[in-house]
Image (cartoon, rainbow, N blue to C red):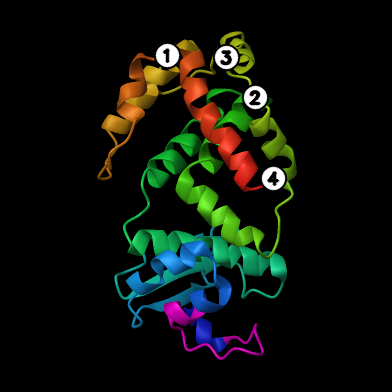
Amino acid sequence: MKHLQSYALYESVNFDGSLLEICDDLLGSTEFWRRNRSLIDPSITLEIDTESPRSADAHFVRDKSTPNKVVIEMSGYPKTLEEKGTLAHELTHAVQWITEREGDLMFITDITSYLEGYSLTDTWERLLFAIYLSCPQEEEAWKMGNRYHRESVLEEILPWMRDFDPQRVSEELLANPPEENPWEITSFSELPAAWAEAYENYGEIQPDSQIPQMGNLTLEQFLEHYGRAFKATAKALR
């Protein structure tokens, strides 16, 4: 394990591993950090683990983090604006975790990843990514990362989210049945009920959410619900 104080990315700043100081530098005077700074104990440290990086460029590791230490896995210490933005993104998730303001983020992260193989169409891939991206906590993290580097994937997905048409997407999904899947759904018309049931059975503690009430929606109504969030996120991240 290597600690953040062991590298010198920012020549003008001396880091001692304090999460508070590092967030002061990377998250700066943003509204997000102004709201949350007073909730972060100055004794909490940040550790960058370069020994066991996951497939992503950086990843906030909940199961290794504790109330006294935040662990972020990265393939190497940040040296570019892109890497700096990636670290800012993951620091945002760490702050959300510490302040218990993750909301539905973990459920949305898990379910969109779990459902990836249910269809091989571009429409399905874009829909899942758009749902993930429009989760308020994920949108917040992308905003922090975009201050340093704007990911090219946004140039494709944001116009799609802005112009999202629930009826057209519903028709496309219904015309292409799901691949064989563990949930045994044979039509995407079953998606709203399956989505709501998965939420109710999810292992994490659930906050108040509209998701359990979505089980009785038609597919088009389900898409309309997320479509409103898509348009708001496309505007926020443009």
Q: What kind of element bears circle 3?
A: helix
Please state which of residues 89 and 186 is positioned toward the viewer in this rendering.
89
Whether residue 121 can be seen here:
no
Mark 2 and mark 1: Cα distance apart in space: 17 Å
Q: Looking at the picture, which amino acid does disc 4 mark?
A: Leu
Q: Residue at x 41, y 16 (%)?
A: 184
- Mark 3 vs mark 1, CA separation in Å: 12 Å
In whole angstroms, how far apart are the C-alphas of marks 3 and 2?
A: 10 Å
10 Å neighbourhood of mark 3: few (<14), some, or many (≥20)? Answer: many
Judged by depth in the image, the label closer to the viewer, 1 or 4, is 4
The quadrant where residue 160 appears = top right
Q: Is residue 40 left or right of residue 130?
A: left
Magenta stretch: give its range: 7-22
Q: Is residue 27 magenta?
A: no
Q: Amino acid at mark 1?
A: Glu
- Quarter of image, res 58: bottom right
Mark 3 sits on what residue? 170
Q: Check if residue 18 falls in the magenta segment.
A: yes
